[in-house]
Amino acid sequence: MSFRDEKRRRTMREIQSAALDLFEARGYDAVSVEAIAAAAGVSAPTVYRNFGTKERIVLWDDYDPDMLDAIAAETRRAKPLAAIEIGLVGALDRIYEADARRVFRRSKLAVKEPALRLANAPALAEMRAQLGAVLVLSYAGMSEARADLLAAVVVVALEIAVNRWIQEQGREPLRSYFREVFADLRSVVLTEGVTA
């Protein structure tokens, strides 16, 4: 990452943190982009240039590329479902150690607010597409349809894990919920006699 990219990433994190403070204090609907900009010490055009919309301020996640890279690395050693689980949990451990509070705050707001749940749908679709592409590139003979199906199931499983984590107020590390949903997923797959 270049110095310029790192500076932009740092600015986006600062804006996101300021926004989360305001949303928690006043409520999501009561906070304007202008108020977020003032709290972050930047101009409103800077906020729009970096995020585009108020929803994206909350939903922006700078860790998705790290997770996909971790999964891709594991595909050299494990079958698809195991590679996804090992890669995700490993990346999540690093993220959680560095940034657990911000991840929890974002996730809690994204689950609670209807506008954010709606705005998050394209991001989930993109994650599914990217994960499917990683699987097709990593496993010779895996069709795009099979990769898409597995990616779709995993994305839904991750949503379930995050929802459980939020419902239980982050009592356990997020990795525990990921492990639980992957165990459930393996159980269903094995029960149906499918290998993944």
Image: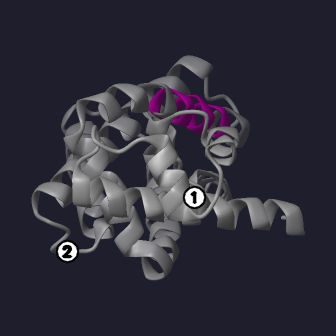
Q: How many numbered marks does the figure carry?
A: 2
In the picture of the structure, the residue carrying the numbered disc 2 is 172
Q: Main secondary structure of the magenta part?
A: helix
Residue 70, position as x, y percentages in the image: 62, 61
Does residue 189 appear anywhere in the picture? Answer: yes
In the picture of the structure, the residue carrying the numbered disc 1 is 63
Check the image and report above or below for 151 versus 101.
Answer: above
Q: Quadrant of the N terminus?
A: bottom right
Q: Quick one: which residue is furthest to the bottom in this view?
A: 97
User: Of helix, strand and loop, which one carries label 1?
Assistant: loop
Q: Is residue 110 left or right of residue 10?
A: left
User: Of helix, strand and loop, which one carries label 2?
Assistant: loop
Residue at screen point 20% across, 43% down: 112
| Precedes in sequence: disc 2 or disc 1 | 1
Tag 2: amino acid: Glu
Tag 1: amino acid: Tyr
Q: Is residue 153 left or right of residue 44?
A: left
Residue at screen point 24% across, 53% down: 26
Residue at screen point 61% across, 44% down: 44
- Binning the other alpha carbons within 10 Å of mark 2 as few (below 14), some (14 to 19) or many (20 upward) gives few
Residue segment shown in magenta: 124-134
